[in-house]
Image (cartoon, rainbow, N blue to C red):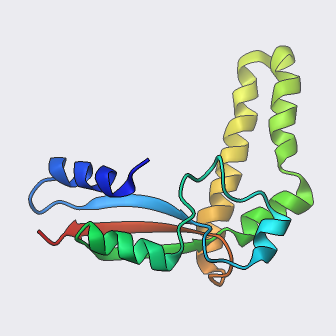
Amino acid sequence: PDPLFAIQKMKDIMAKDGYISFEVGVVGGISTFWYKLFPLGLPQHRWLYSEKSLKKLLEQAKLNVVHKTTHSLAPYLFLKKISGLVLIGVLKRLLNPVIGKRAAMFVDLHNNFTNFLRYSVGRYFPNLGPLTVLYIAKSEE
């Protein structure tokens, strides 16, 4: 519930010359087009960060960004909308009684494909709309 407090806790246990690595969803400060088309926000995200608000948070936390990669969620969101990737989750529930432990295979397939779209494909898309940002940061203190 308190991102600044959470970062401070991470810094407290970090080695003197250590780094903090984390992922943040950027769904704030984007065009309303995205909100009309996709269910962005709660419960997936407690805070609707924009890139501007993230910069401010990192400054307040006294963190210097050492490395940052930005990944567009557009490929994942559009393909999910068009192809109905959610069907994999439904199939898993329907097939679970029939194939038992093998149903986990569908979950793994879905997760791998989702991660591929979010991180491998999304990295090369323009930063339009919702994003996932991966940070590596070092304490200023």
- Residue, x 28% and y 59% (percent of image)? 20
Q: Nearer the viewer, residue 20 or 32?
A: 32
- Residue, x 60% and y 70% (percent of image)? 28
From this view, report whether residue 108 is shown above or below residue 104.
below
Q: Could you tell me how many numbered marks the image carries?
A: 0
The x, y position of residue 50, in whole percent, is 54, 74
- Residue, x 86% and y 16% (percent of image)? 98
The x, y position of residue 103, in whole percent, is 76, 26
The C terminus lies in which quarter of the figure? bottom left
The x, y position of residue 56, in whole percent, is 37, 75
Q: Nearer the viewer, residue 29 or 119?
A: 29
Is residue 64 shown left or right of residue 131?
Answer: left
The x, y position of residue 10, in whole percent, is 25, 50
Quadrant in the picture for residue 62 = bottom left
Quadrant in the picture for residue 128 = bottom right
Is residue 139 shown left or right of residue 87?
Answer: left
Q: Nearer the viewer, residue 128 or 123?
A: 128
From this view, report whether residue 92 is shown above or below residue 65.
above
- Residue extending farthest bottom: 126
Is residue 121 shown left or right of residue 9?
Answer: right
- Residue, x 62% and y 80% (percent of image)? 124
From this view, report whether residue 45 is shown above or below residue 51.
above
